[in-house]
Image: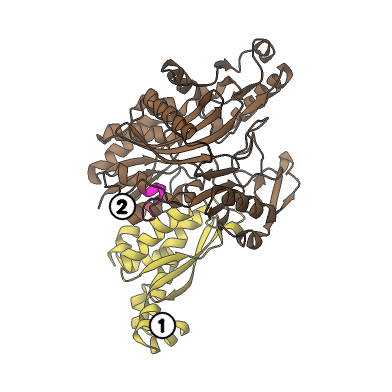
Chain colours: A brown, B yellow
Amino acid sequence: MPRLLLLLPTTTYRTAAFLGAARKLGAEVVVASERAHVFQQAQPGRFLSLDFLHPDQATRQVVEFAVTRPIDAVVGVDDATAVLAAVLSNALGLPHNPLRSTVAARDKYRMRTLLRGNGVPVPPYALRSFDDNPVVEARRTAFPCVVKPLMLSASRGVIRADGEAQFVGAVRRLERILRTPEAAADGEAARQVLVEGFIPGREVALEGLLVKGDLHVLALFDKPDPLDGPFFEETIYVTPSRLPSTVQAEIASCTARAAEALGLRDGPVHAELRVNRHGPWVIEVAARSIGGLCSRTLRFGTGLSLEELILRQALGMEIPSLEREHRAAGVMMIPIPRAGVLKEIRGQTEARAVPGIDEVAITAHPGQDLVPLPEGASYPGFIFARAESSERVEAALREAHRRLEFVVMAPRKPSEAVSP
Amino acid sequence: MGLFRRWFGGSEGRSGEAVTGLTAPETLEQHGHRSAVSDERARSDGEQGEDSRIRVKVQYLLETAINPAVAGHGGVVSLVDVKDRMVYLQMGGGCQGCGMADVTLKQGIETMIREELPEVVDIIDVTDHTAGENPYSAASKK
């Protein structure tokens, strides 16, 4: 039985999908998280607590662990753990992406520098520090622009500015976000800001699997809701894309060149691109799979999940098919309706009754603080649909969402704040 | 019953008593101290009898090993039913809605139950995790 080391942050949405896939493949799983699990002492062969922020220490622990319990693959599930997976795989002598590639894929500035240097189209960009005077910086910035943190994901901290005053406000707001303990753990990166030109156009997401340097496109998602700012809340993803096949081919080619420029060779990639009359522009290429619960939209071959594909590749198992099912599929990341404390979400039965709806997965809990972007870090839940066409999938998602009613109480006062 | 030595060290009976004051279920059964529910089931056909035996052992594991552990995170796990060698569990407190509930169930609880009761077909979590009001870890998009 192969032994798999899964790097699972305690806050990830991806736990159930990866554990389920590992079970189907018959792999023995060792779960490594940043906090000790309650069963770690009772079952030391199945749990590790690793400091994800200190790879050297984590490496020593894992190498020592592997002396008595050899590990066949290390898999991370998000941006941070993808980097650590490369570090640990290197120490254990397992196949892995080059460390510099995973680091570059995690750092928006390094990524853009490598992409631009290799002729991959990216928005014009500049690196600024929070130590710089934003009023002065605003005067030498072209508008509209987008300010971004270097390392957060899912649009967190991303703000559009159309003029100098908005720019100053956006930078100061981002600085406050990056002062939170979780974001500040990124060190120097949390003291810097990426300023890039706003690229008008449609946005798409490409889910792919790299096999020995070749990109296999698993799915191309349209994002039918306009993402023009001032914040960039992701909502609906639908596949297959309704873009012309020539444009889809350009997107795939552009993503493949981006992965090559970063030096990524194996494993999942999740890319975000803008498309306009000039062609595709790479916004992100992450060395991980799609986030949240969104992978539930994807089935391959005879029903394999995305996570099964990823684990099969990592464990050196045969991958029977990389072909997605023929039906259209989509997900809505339920938008935060407003800031406040969630009391309940009504209408779930009615939402599930919409033809084409597979699942309404509510992940927020009663009493949870709902925090909209750009500060927010979680979704109330996800809606999944399948139908004969992308149009029907999109319509089903919108109708199901319309039937949900969010009962949200006033935000807590700072003195009432609860720890996460 | 090597499981108890691995979890608590020492001999089974001693360590079991040290944790909860209970003795192993086999000992209870030998002395005729089975619950009314399990007695009723034991009188029926063999399959129900097996479910009854599984029920007693799972309950014992919950009380002596599983719940003392999850209590550290404010959690609690209850046995809802055993039917056709399928074990139905419900998670509460800090486990309900916790982002690591799957890990707790599949890596921890399930491993413990299967080591002790390999005849168990499956372990099903029947918790409504969306109703958890105080999960120990909540998922977020990092």
Q: Amino acid at mark 1?
A: His
Q: Position of residue A299 (x, y in %)?
A: 42, 51
Instruction: Using residue A93 as the reference point, say whether residue A414 is left or right of it.
Output: right
Which residue position holds label 2?
A: A28
Asked if residue A21 is among those painted magenta in the image, a careful observer would answer: no
Q: Residue at x 50, y 50 (%)?
A: A328
Does residue B114 appear in this view? yes
A40, A55: nearer the viewer: A55
Q: Nearer the viewer, mark 2 or mark 1?
A: 2
The correct choice, above or below, for A353 with respect to A413 in the image is: below
Estimate the spatial distance between the alpha carbons at disc 2 and disc 1, rounded to whole Å: 38 Å
Q: Position of residue B127 (x, y in %)?
A: 53, 63
Q: Residue at x 41, y 31 (%)?
A: A54
Which residue position holds label 1?
A: B33
Quadrant of the image occupied by residue B27 = bottom left
Asked if residue A301 is among those painted magenta in the image, a careful observer would answer: yes
Q: Residue at x 33, y 77 (%)?
A: B26
Q: Which residue is the extreme one toward the right?
A: A410
Magenta region: which residues? A300-308
